[in-house]
Amino acid sequence: MTKVKWHPNDFQVFEINGLDERMEALTTQIRPKFHTLGEFFSAYFSTQTGDEFFAHVAKHARRTVNPPKDSWVAFAPYKRGYKALPHFQIGLWGTHVFIVVAVIYEAPHKQEMATRLLEHMDIFDQLPDDFIISGDHMAPDAIPLMTARDEKLRQLLVRLHDVKKGEFLIGRHILAEDAVEMSAEQFMQLTEQTFDELMPVYNAIIGR
């Protein structure tokens, strides 16, 4: 089993001042874990979907001043990038781990994706109550699915369809204090379980 164990200092990376200093910590401390997760879950998604998936570890290469506030590994069936496609992510903010499937504003066909989700709202009824939804991949905040299954969920999907900057993320957040208490095995099991639960949403997004 792939071993990725989170520690308090993994989340404290985002408290380091200075772009170069924070990037150094991300590169040496966090990125190896994302590469490990990338290798394991790209194989998982390839098996689950029948499409070859590739892992994309965030490089934050365009940043020249502001240090990154989060980081991630993304998974998509395209070797050269992931932002234009619906994609899965495992990532960190200073407060939590996120495990999500996402459609972000760069996706050229997000109107069609939103329509498919609006036509299959019943798939959200099957998801666990501890799932979250979000309309902004740049913000750490999210809405509990349990309180958003009807109106707020529909509003986010309509916004995904109608607004150029509209986005949609759904999945699970693990608070930092809970993540550091989990063994590597527990984290991997919960991550795989989360992706299993998200697969019907992904299939609806791509029209499968």
Image: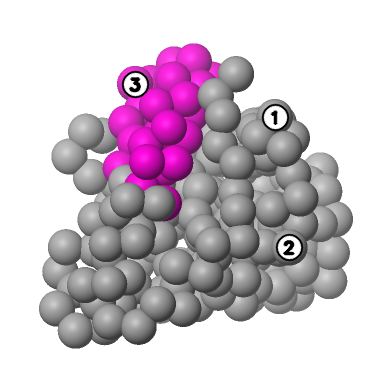
Q: Residue 70 appears at what percent x and percent y? A: 43, 67
Residue at the disc numbered 2: 177
Query: Any magenta on residue 188?
Result: no
Of the residues shown, which amino acid type is indicated by label 2? Glu
User: Is residue 52 depicted above or below 117 in this figure?
Assistant: above
Label 3 secondary element: loop
Whichever of callouts 2 and 1 sits on the residue coming sooner in the sequence is 2
Magenta stretch: give its range.
30-56
The quadrant of the rendering that contains the N terminus is top right
- Residue 206 horizontal side relative to residue 54, left or right: right
Q: Residue at x 26, y 34 (%)?
A: 78
Between marks 3 and 1, how big is the CA–CA gap? Answer: 25 Å
State whether residue 52 appears in this view: yes
Residue at the disc numbered 3: 52
Whichever of callouts 3 and 1 sits on the residue coming sooner in the sequence is 3
Label 1 secondary element: helix
- Residue 197 horizontal side relative to residue 95, left or right: right
Query: Any magenta on residue 37?
Result: yes
Of 16 and 152, the residue lying toward us: 16
User: Is residue 60 depicted above or below 7 in this figure?
Assistant: below
Query: Within 10 Å of the Cα at label 2, are there few (<14), some (14-19), or many (20+) other Cα atoms?
Result: some
- Depth check, mark 3 against mark 1: the one in front is 1
Q: Residue at x 56, y 37 (%)?
A: 4
- Residue 142 horizontal side relative to residue 39, left or right: right
